[in-house]
Amino acid sequence: MLKYVNLELPARFNIFFPCIVLGLYHNIASNWRAKRTPYLAIYIISIVSFLSLISHKEPKFLLPVFPPLFLIIGQYLQTHIKAYPKFIKSYVIFGVLLEICINYYFVSWHEIGAFGPIEHLRAKYPGYRSLIVSNKFEGNYLSLNHRPNGESPRMTFMTHDPLFVKAANENIPLIQSIEHPILESLELLTHLEHTPLPDFAIIDHIWPRYCREAVEYTLKAKGYELEKKFYYGMEKPSMTH
């Protein structure tokens, strides 16, 4: 129930999270002394409390409270900068640099999806003809496979997002799936039994171990060998046939 408070907000605001806690207290206390209603604090607390009661939780649901949270942080720092000018300035500069480093890490390595394995295949096997990806369809994946002669490899994607179903009308093969790892792995295995085997398969590590191992065992039984594992936060075993 407290996932947003003890996990998501600290993860998103990092070093500035203490400013949120102290800032909310300061906002409520200062408005209370001035006999004013702390609308900003009420807005933040009520939305976070309501979202915490919902069983399905995702970080993106917090986006409506991000602007007021930044206001709370700014308000708290502004009220203390006269008393601790050097500390506050150093704190803010360090926090900004820390956020830049964290975002650079996630964008460049951790959240690479299937981009890393596809780049590896392009460099080592420039003439590969087909690929299946157990990863949500991403239009950018297609751009990685454009070739000057127009003979791009056939790529098959799994998807449970109805927004991507329209890609089927553009001759992009999709495996319709439900957002559940067991069902997705079974659908992938069924697909491999009834279609020509692709040259390569990229298997997502975020599946439970038994689901991933079942797919990898089936691929090995069909003659695939492990090409390479990618350990950049999201391991991507790329199996080659």
Image (tube, rainbow, N blue to C red):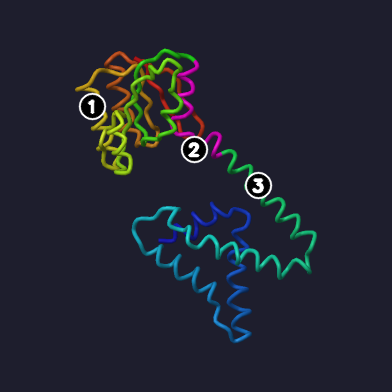
Identify which residue is drawn at 55% across, 78% down. 38
- Relative placement, left or right, of 192 versus 108 is left
Indicate which disc, 3 or 1, sits on the residue closer to the N terminus: 3
Image position of 56 (left or right of 73)? left
Which of pointers 3 and 1 indicates the residue nearer the eye?
1
With 30 as the anchor, is 183 left or right in this view?
A: left
In which quarter of the view is residue 210 placed? top left
What is the x, y in percent for residue 102?
60, 43
Q: What residue does disc 2 label?
A: 111
Quadrant containing the C terminus is top left
Q: Please tell me the numbered disc located at residue 191.
A: 1
Based on the picture, tell me whether residue 113 belongs to the magenta stretch: yes
In whole angstroms, how far apart are the C-alphas of marks 1 and 2?
A: 26 Å
Span highlighted in magenta in the image: 106-123
In terms of secondary structure, where does tag 1 sit?
helix
Q: Quadrant of residue 156?
A: top left
Q: Which residue is mark 3?
A: 98
Q: Nearer the viewer, residue 39 or 187?
A: 39
Q: CA distance from mark 2 to mark 3?
A: 18 Å
Rendered view: 26 above or below 169: below
**Secondary structure found at label 2:** loop
Callout 2 amino acid: Glu
Frontmost residue, 6 versus 11: 11
Please state which amino acid type lies under the numbered disc 3: Leu
